[in-house]
Image (tube, coloured by chain):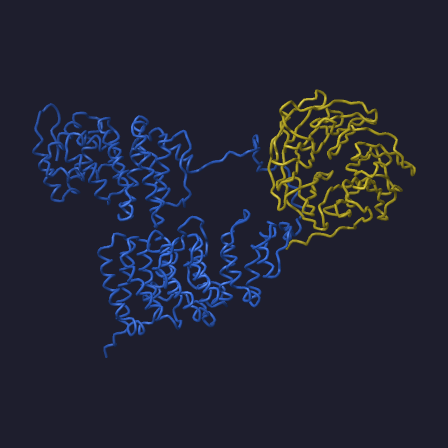
């Protein structure tokens, strides 16, 4: 396709028609693949070609405009190119405006970041279109901040909207911000609240990153909002959107002020108190011979920190120190030494187990001890494994009691899981069998990573059930030891499942505290999984499936994911014959529910888990079918 | 496989009080006996005979107030001692005498040890903390005339001087003074003009002790925190931090560099003596003998390098003598 240049006042509406028709029929790729590079090259310097191009797209009839615009936005190599190709189309044509500002941003979410950059950059480049940019930002923020959207829309869509917001922010200049500072602030506050309320850590993090960026933008001098979150690849990628990427093939533009604020906020450099004036760099090459070399150092391995107070040696003394003593050093030493003491003296620990569990559950951090939460948890696990039955009874009853904080209730769940893990694994090896089993690493922020890790265990168990045709390295057989968890599994499991629907004045699992409900469900899934090969497993499975049935329509996707993990654990742990004999009705009901979830659930993870469960069920059926003779 | 740390060569007992300061005098020829002077908290200065490991004489001149510095002037017959009775005494110990021949009233109630430097034959300079809080006075001995008083400028907020070191680049050149202060800074003073040449903040806590190697223009300071700071002096007489070394336990009471500039010893509050190589501050040994905080360390001045000793005095009333890296 080549055009005759120069002077001719030709009408190109015919060409526009062809373009439109071809695009609508789905052949965007072929035609635009040829057209766009040509036009890019031609319009680079030549104004006339630019005008021709603009006329070309403007003349496309409305019914085909959407396809053409979509094609251009997706295929243009950069925002400035898009600007050259489309001109002020979005301002002049209603349909194009709708597609660009509403459809691509709010109604669809499948486009890549590059496409978003193109689109929003295009809006930012021209004064006429800037007003649209601000309007778009406001609408995006409305969606971002609406609590129903946060709860019900898929995570991918929320990510898309967040990216769009960040890119818009990167294009905003001072005068734009001035005009809409108040609205930005209001929407940010609304949005942050909804995001932080969510149970999914990803959603919370998205909220935090966007809120930080908005606050940095609108409050460039004053104190900015700063959250604590895991700064991994995703967060970094999001934050990098705030920096304007240089247009392809051009010299990188001057750094935006958004970038400086962002790095200051993200890095949070502290200036040291002492004014250390000029550090002389270490001379690497010593001209003289290093006569230090002939001085051989002595063994300095005994050089450790001096301990001022000694920890008590008896467990009863420990209890005294933890409950009564004001001596902070002794208290610290006790907390550090408690776990090993409990493990070394199981008989003594058994005498005071419930008391010790009580003390530990209510233990608050008295001094700034490093790793306090971990030390406390390890001690609790030690107590629980030393004397499982009474302590488990105590802890599960406390889980449903009045006047505990959410953190304490979740601690109870964590401790139960860790102890169950320890009890169910052969002690001789010392380590857990499964690769990637979580090391109890507690984050003091709500929503620790343990839920993800538990799911990973289940996934790996599923993986291990699939047939492999190549033989991996054979692992040394672990020495067999009696499964200590089997006698106490029921004590861990049933009390937790009993009282979930009874609301208390300070604790309502089915109501507001759905985060704890999610954790409870995940805990039950893990306990079920660890109960494989125990005697009570069938009864547990039946109870668990009933529990899942009761909660299956819960609105929170974290809870639903937990419920699906419960189903997986049940299918994996309960022996197939028992499942088919004793648990048949529940199985069938669950299966119909799973099929429903696979098709209709908005959350991608839920759908995936449901599919896995259906596959497991199929495997079960196949295993039990009589082999054709 | 590194060797285990050595044991002390011998331990001197008998002071019956915490030992605050030590000074060797072993450079004499035969038949002179190598001597170690020690000052204790009960006001006594013990003169130890290093052959018999017994006390030869005990000098009582500070009214039972703690002695916190001893140093010889020109051989072992003349001894200076500083006590918390606000006096610096000059002792005449020749031919078995034990008398105080002269005395300086410092009117200072602090703990800052003095520093002595021989600038010419028969002339010494002694720096000491003066009566006013932040001042240092430098006296010429034996005339006891004041050479200068070093006052930091108003608003400097350095606090008390904690440790002093007089030095000169080579014999006959300008004497200079390094002082460590309560606020953690080390200041280089010019004595002739009484002005600050350079100031460097090395620590967050008071500088407990410092020592300086005039050949390499490098010094080290220790404080009540866990960090040792090594700094150097460049041609413009400016102090710069060279590097820092982190210790396992906080608190250093004394640092001293061996006269041959190969190793240095630190006395710690954690009851341990640490030996480092001076060139690169390579940790060489941790000597763990004492059961209470070590107050002072000192290297001997034996002419024969293989006889050199390290002495450490501690709050547990013992003085341990070590022979290490000779």
Give left or right: position of A420 versus A344. left
Looking at the picture, tell me which residue is in the foreground, B267 or A205.
A205
Q: Is residue A463 above or below residue A83?
A: below
Q: Residue furthest bottom?
A: A629
| Total marks placed | 0
| Chain depicted in yellow | B
Q: Indicate the position of residue A511 as horizontal and vertical percent values.
A: 33, 53
Q: Indicate the position of residue A360 as horizontal and vertical percent values.
A: 51, 57
Any part of residue B302 in sight = no
Q: Indicate the position of residue A200 as horizontal and vertical percent values.
A: 34, 50
Q: Is residue A606 above or below residue B295?
A: below
Looking at the picture, tell me which residue is in the foreground, A552 or A102.
A552
Q: Is residue A607 above or below residue A122?
A: below
Q: Colour of chain A?
A: blue
Looking at the picture, tell me which residue is in the foreground, A436 or A333.
A333
> What residue sits 9% from the left and 40% below the top?
A21
- Write down the quadrant of residue B177 in the picture: top right
Give left or right: position of A280 versus A171. right
């Amino acid at each position: 396709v080549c055009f005759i240049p120069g002077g001719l006042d030709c009408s190109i509406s015919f060409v526009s028609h062809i373009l439109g028709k071809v695009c609508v029929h789905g052949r965007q790729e072929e035609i635009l693949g040829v057209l766009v590079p040509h036009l890019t090259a031609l319009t680079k310097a030549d104004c006339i070609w630019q005008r021709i191009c603009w006329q070309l797209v403007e003349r496309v009839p409305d019914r085909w405009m959407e396809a053409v615009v979509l094609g251009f936005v997706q295929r243009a190599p950069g925002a400035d190119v898009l600007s050259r190709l489309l001109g002020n189309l979005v301002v002049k044509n209603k349909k194009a405006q709708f597609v660009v500002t509403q459809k691509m941003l709010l109604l669809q979410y499948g486009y890549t970041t590059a496409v978003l950059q193109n689109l929003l950059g295009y809006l930012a480049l021209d004064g006429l279109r800037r007003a649209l940019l601000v309007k778009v930002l406001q609408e995006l923020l409305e969606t971002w901040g609406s609590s129903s959207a946060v709860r019900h829309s898929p995570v991918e869509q929320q990510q898309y909207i967040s990216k769009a917001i960040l890119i818009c922010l990167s294009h905003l200049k001072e005068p734009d911000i001035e005009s809409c500072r108040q609205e930005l602030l209001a929407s940010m506050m609304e949005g942050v609240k909804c995001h932080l309320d969510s149970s999914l850590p990803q959603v919370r993090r998205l909220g935090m990153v966007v809120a930080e960026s908005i606050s940095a933008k609108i409050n460039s001098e004053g104190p900015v909002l700063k959250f604590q979150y895991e700064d991994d690849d995703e967060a970094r990628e999001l934050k990098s959107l705030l920096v304007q990427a240089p247009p392809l093939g051009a010299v990188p533009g001057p750094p935006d002020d958004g970038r400086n604020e962002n790095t200051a906020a993200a890095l949070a450099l502290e200036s040291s108190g002492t004014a250390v004036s000029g550090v002389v760099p270490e001379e690497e090459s010593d001209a003289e011979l290093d006569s230090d070399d002939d001085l051989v150092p002595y063994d300095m391995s005994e050089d450790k920190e001096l301990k001022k107070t000694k920890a008590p040696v008896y467990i009863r003394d420990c209890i005294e120190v933890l409950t009564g003593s004001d001596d902070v050093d002794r208290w610290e030493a006790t907390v550090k030494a408690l776990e090993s003491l409990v493990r070394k003296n199981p008989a003594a620990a058994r005498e005071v187990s419930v008391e010790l569990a009580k003390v530990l559950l209510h233990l608050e951090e008295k001094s700034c001890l490093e790793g306090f939460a971990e030390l406390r948890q390890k001690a609790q696990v030690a107590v629980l494994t030393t004397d499982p039955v009474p302590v488990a009874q105590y802890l599960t009853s406390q889980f449903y009691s009045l006047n505990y904080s959410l953190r304490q209730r979740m601690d109870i769940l964590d401790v139960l899981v860790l102890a169950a893990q320890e009890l169910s694994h052969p002690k001789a090896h010392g380590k857990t069998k499964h690769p990637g089993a979580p090391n109890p690493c507690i984050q003091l922020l709500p929503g620790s990573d343990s839920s993800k890790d538990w799911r990973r265990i289940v996934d790996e168990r599923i993986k291990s059930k699939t047939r492999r045709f190549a033989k991996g390295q054979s692992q040394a057989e672990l020495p067999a030891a009696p499964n200590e968890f089997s006698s106490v599994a029921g004590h861990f499991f049933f009390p937790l499942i009993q009282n979930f629907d009874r609301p208390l004045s300070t604790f309502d699992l089915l109501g507001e505290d759905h985060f704890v409900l999610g954790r409870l469900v995940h805990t039950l899934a893990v306990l079920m999984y660890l109960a494989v090969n125990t005697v009570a497993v069938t009864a547990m499975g039946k109870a668990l499936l009933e529990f899942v049935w009761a909660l299956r329509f819960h609105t929170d996707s974290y809870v639903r994911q937990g419920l699906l993990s419960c189903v997986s654990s049940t299918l994996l742990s309960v022996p197939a014959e028992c499942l088919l004999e004793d648990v048949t009705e529940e199985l069938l009901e669950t299966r119909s529910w799973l099929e429903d979830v696979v098709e209709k659930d908005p959350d991608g993870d839920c759908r995936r888990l449901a599919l896995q469960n259906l596959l497991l069920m199929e495997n079960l059926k196949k295993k039990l079918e009589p082999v054709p003779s | 496989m590194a060797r285990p740390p050595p044991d002390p060569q011998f331990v001197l007992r008998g002071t019956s009080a915490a030992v605050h300061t030590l000074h060797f005098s072993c450079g004499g020829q035969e038949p002179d006996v190598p001597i170690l002077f020690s000052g204790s908290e009960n006001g006594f200065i013990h003169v130890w005979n290093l052959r018999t490991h017994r006390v030869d004489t005990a000098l009582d001149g500070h009214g039972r107030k703690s002695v916190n510095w001893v140093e010889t002037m020109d051989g072992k017959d003349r001894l200076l001692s500083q006590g918390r009775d606000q006096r610096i005494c000059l002792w005449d110990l020749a031919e078995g005498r034990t008398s105080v021949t002269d005395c300086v009233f410092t009117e200072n109630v602090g703990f800052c040890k003095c520093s002595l430097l021989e600038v010419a034959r028969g002339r010494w300079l002694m720096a000491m903390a003066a009566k006013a809080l932040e001042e240092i006075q430098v006296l010429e001995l034996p005339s006891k005339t004041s050479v200068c008083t070093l006052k930091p400028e108003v608003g400097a907020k350095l606090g008390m001087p904690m440790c002093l070191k007089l030095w000169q680049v080579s014999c006959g050149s300008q004497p200079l003074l390094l002082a460590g202060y309560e606020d953690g800074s080390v200041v280089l003073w010019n004595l002739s003009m009484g002005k600050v040449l350079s100031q460097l903040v090395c620590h967050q806590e008071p500088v407990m002790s410092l020592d300086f190697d005039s050949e390499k223009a490098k010094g080290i300071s220790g404080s009540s925190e866990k960090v040792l700071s090594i700094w150097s002096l460049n041609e413009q007489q400016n102090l710069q931090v060279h590097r820092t070394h982190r210790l396992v336990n906080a608190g250093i009471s004394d640092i001293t560099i061996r006269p041959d500039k190969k190793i240095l010893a630190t006395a710690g509050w954690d009851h341990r003596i640490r030996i480092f190589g001076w060139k690169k501050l390579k940790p060489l040994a941790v000597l763990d003998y004492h059961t209470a905080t070590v107050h002072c360390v000192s290297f001997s001045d034996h002419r024969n390098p293989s006889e050199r000793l390290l002495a450490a005095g501690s709050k547990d009333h013992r003085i341990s003598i070590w022979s290490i890296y000779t």
